[in-house]
Amino acid sequence: MSQKPIMVTRSSMPPFEEYVDEIRELWDSHWLTNMGAKHQELERALKDRLGIENVCLFTNGHNALECILEALDLRGEVITTPYTFASTTHAITRKGLTPVFADIRMSDYTLDPESIEKLITPRTCAIVPVHVYGGLCDIDAIQRIADEHGLKVIYDAAHAFGVERDGVSAASFGDASMFSFHATKVFNTIEGGAVCFKDPALYNVLNQWKNFGITSTETVEYVGGNAKMNVFCAAMGICNLRHLDEEIAKRKLVYERYVERLGNIPGIKLNEIPENVTYNYAYFPVLFDENVFGATRDDVYATLMTVDIHPRKYFYPLVNDFDCYRSVYSSDRTPVAKYVADRILTLPMYADLALEDVDRICDLVLSCQK
Ligand code: T4K
């Protein structure tokens, strides 16, 4: 059945009774937060699902990223991408580090390893790449650069939950990966996030950072914050994790219909999924080349908005064009990112999007063609 309005995404939720059953025991325990039983249970379930050893839950992906940057005790410059959500750069800046923007690749809009290499200085301490739309970065090239120069790699994997390369989860790459479990994500805990990491010693440190730096009832060793996931969010995660495969399978159908309708249109570029990657179908980005397609991204955006369909320009403007950064940075230095940000539109994508609505969206997109 056609919905109105159609937003860029729509949170998936478990059956109501399933969630109620999950939270019933919380009324008996009266333990609502501070790493309660559901919190531990979700961490265990995530380890199983992702095939990893180390995971730490957080209130949201942003706090998770701030905490891992802090826990790794980084100082100096961090090479990152301007083609991302505000969170990535803000986390770096708020932790007293200096973001340095490298350019992205045209193929999948992730960081271009060549561009990273040119920006390394003696002050560089880390690389924070983003698996944009769930498409994996050039992990091997980035790791080679990091190893050569002794840099940490912290992936912003906010979009990449459920993505695998050759059967290995996106959670396994670099020194650490941050996931967002926000309501808009393929897997959500309402608000939430996690860090997956290599060094097991980080688990206690992250737990302390997210709990005011408290190390025992009578000792506080760090100036930590409060970034603990509460158990109602963890319970939502436990439920949603049971439905993850179904969620991704439904998204795949939507994705395939979009590709069928928009895949061979001159002036439209879609992202390709490499053969060895299992994708999560998190977003459906479309790049419009106005010279070939005959209409701009903004023309298509306006056409859809007129009929209450709300695509989004993720990620426009570029972070280096934000008011809070543009006095220091210039998007002219990241020309590929600038080109993409001016032409990208992410079309509605979620598990329950009806295929007839996908057809309607595609008809409207194609009606802009000249
Ligand atoms: N790094 C990257 C690369 C990220 O993309 C993000 C977050 C982060 C880090 C930080 O992770 P978190 O700290 O958020 O865990 C949304 C999300 O709020 C944000 O999580 C996400 N990226 C970003 C790409 O998208 P907005 O400002 O576009 O959200 P909003 O409120 O306009 O919602 C978009 C659509 O989602 C709505 O039109 C309808 C739907 N929606 C929204 C909400 C809040 C629902 O269906 N249910 C909901 O509860 O940022």
Image (cartoon, helix red, strand yellow):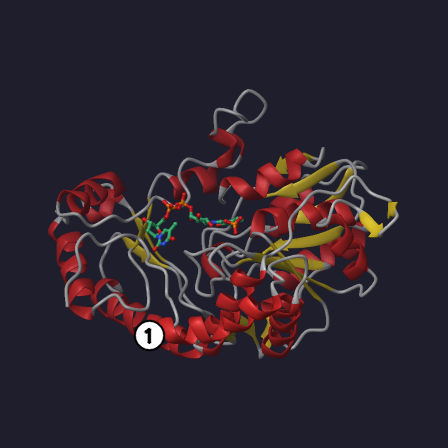
In this view, the residue in front, 276 or 12, is 12
Residue that appears at 28% across and 46% down: 289
**Quadrant housing the N terminus:** bottom left
**Image location of residue 298, percent across then percent down:** 24, 39
Residue hosting label 1 = 250
Above-or-below relation of 282 to 218:
below
Image coordinates of residue 152 in percent, x first then y, are 75, 52
Q: Is residue 281 visible?
A: yes
Residue 83 locus on image (x, y percent): 49, 43
Above or below: residue 252 compared with residue 338? below
Q: Nearer the viewer, residue 23 or 50?
A: 23
Question: Mark 1, residues whose alpha carbon is within 10 Å: few (<14), some, or many (≥20)?
Answer: some
**Is 28 displayed left or right of 182 in the figure?**
right
Q: Residue 299 in the image: state x and y as whole percent.
A: 19, 40
**Residue type (three-letter) at the residue carrying disc 1:** Lys
Spot the residue most to the front: 28
Evaluate whether residue 81 shows in this view. Answer: no
Mark 1, secondary structure of its residue: helix
